[in-house]
Image (cartoon, rainbow, N blue to C red):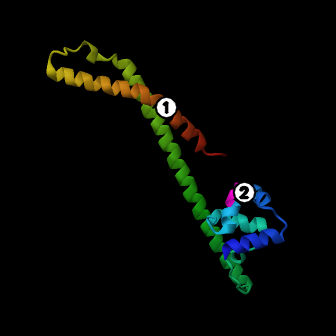
Amino acid sequence: MLSENIKTIRKARGLSQEGLAVQLHVVRQTISKWEQGISVPDADLLIALAEALEVPVSTLLGETAAPPPTDDWRALSEKLEAINLQLARRKAARRALLHGLSLALCAVLAAGTILLLLWHSPYLSWDYADPETAVVGVALHAFEWLFVRIAPPLFLVGVIGACLTRRRG
């Protein structure tokens, strides 16, 4: 039902799949999949789709409800506003969490690098003839070896994550 409605209304408005895709900031294949019923738009895109096609969401979904009285419109509007506010808060909270995790990753990696630089690898002067210090020395060497190779790409991932999730004013 939704797929047929999208296609019918899009064609009635004289829009191509490409033109509609540009308005919604998606690729043309996404519109094609919606019209074929292979996938469906999420809530945000469904609202944007309805706005782009200049129809209510209920029309896209196939409902043929009589227009409610003005008070019902107001109540519906308030409910939609509350839902939009919840979605915006949830999205902001997710973005803040990812931003914090990215910054924490960068801080941990920077601190680890500084510690390794200040530590001067004392295991190099250990007595490897003693089995206990040999095992610990090898373990520390393995840790440093892994850290030095893994830390730079992880730091880059952290910086990119922090940049992509920063709060835009």
> Which quarter of the figure has residue 17?
bottom right
Is residue 29 highlighted in magenta? yes
Q: Residue at x 60, y 68 (%)?
A: 83
- Label 1 to label 2: alpha-carbon separation: 34 Å
Q: Residue at x 29, y 25 (%)?
A: 140
Q: Looking at the rendered structure, which numbered label has been put on residue 153?
A: 1
Q: Amino acid at mark 2?
A: Arg
> Which quarter of the figure has residue 129?
top left
Q: How many marks?
A: 2
Closer to the camera, 157 or 8?
Answer: 8
Q: Residue at x 69, y 77 (%)?
A: 58
Find residue 107 and report its horizontal and vertical position in percent. 46, 33
Is residue 8 highlighted in magenta? no
Tell me which segment is drawn in magenta: 26-30
Look at the picture and state if 62 lies above or below 154. below
Label 1: which secondary element: helix
Determine the residue located farthest toward the top in the rendered image. 125
Q: Decide if residue 54 is in sight here.
A: no
Q: Amino acid at mark 1?
A: Pro
Find residue 165 and report its horizontal and vertical position in percent. 58, 45
Which residue was labeled with disc 2?
28
Closer to the camera, 89 or 17?
Answer: 17
